[in-house]
Amino acid sequence: MLTKTQQKKYLPVLLDILEKLGVKLGRMGEAVLLGEVDAADADGEDGGGQSYSREMQIGLLENEEFILKAVRAAVKRIELGTFGSCQACDELIPPRRLEVLPYTSFCLACQKKLEKGEFEE
Ligand SMILES: [Zn+2]
């Protein structure tokens, strides 16, 4: 499981997606935002890299509503401290995947199973 600090690094990214979707930050996002997000930013690991934005925007156009739900759920997971772990198998979701799809709930293997409809509890 990712540490709180590791998880919170993704919060600005998630909130940014919400903003792009035209969502005003709800209580949930604001509450987390007012927490230790600045401290997480200060470690400078962001480096201004925005390589994810292109894929993200394509995704946004495709299924905005799904993503909106997923982002809210991801913010919630940061609050709960479970962000970054696959919701199906509990494995860590690789950081590279989280960079492209920070709101994903599943690791690639589980996502594929899900898409093929062969998912089992
Ligand atoms: Zn999984």
Image (spheres, rainbow, N blue to C red):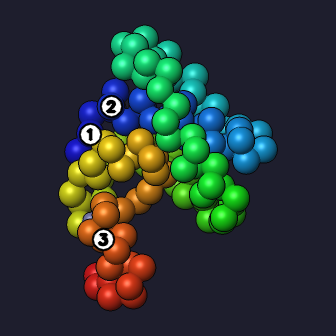
Mark 3 near ligand 1 (CB under 8 Å)? yes
Which residue is label 3 attached to?
Answer: 110
Which-is-in-front pick, marks 1 and 3? 3
Locate residue 94, reporting x and y percent: 27, 48
Residue 117 in view, yes or no:
yes
**Within 10 Å of the Cα at label 3, are there few (<14), some (14-19), or many (20+) other Cα atoms?**
some
Please tell me whether residue 40 is drawn above or below residue 3 in the rendered image: above
Tell me which residue sits at (37%, 36%) in the image.
Answer: 7
Which-is-in-front pick, marks 2 and 3? 3
Mark 2 near ligand 1 (CB under 8 Å)? no
Decide which of tag 2 and tag 3 comes sooner along the chain: 2
Locate residue 70, reporting x and y percent: 55, 58
Asked where in the image residue 104 lies, by quadrant, the reply is bottom left
**Within 10 Å of the Cα at label 1, are there few (<14), some (14-19), or many (20+) other Cα atoms?**
some
Q: Tell me the amino acid under the disc marked 3.
A: Cys
Which residue is label 1 attached to?
Answer: 2
Asked where in the image residue 69 lies, by quadrant, the reply is bottom right
C-alpha distance separating marks 1 and 3? 19 Å
In the shown orientation, is residue 33 left or right of residue 78? right
Tag 2 secondary structure: helix
Which residue is label 2 attached to?
Answer: 6
Q: Are marks 1 and 3 in contact (CB under 8 Å)?
A: no
Q: Quadrant of the C terminus?
A: bottom left
Q: Quadrant of the N terminus?
A: top left
Q: Are marks 1 and 2 in contact (CB under 8 Å)?
A: yes
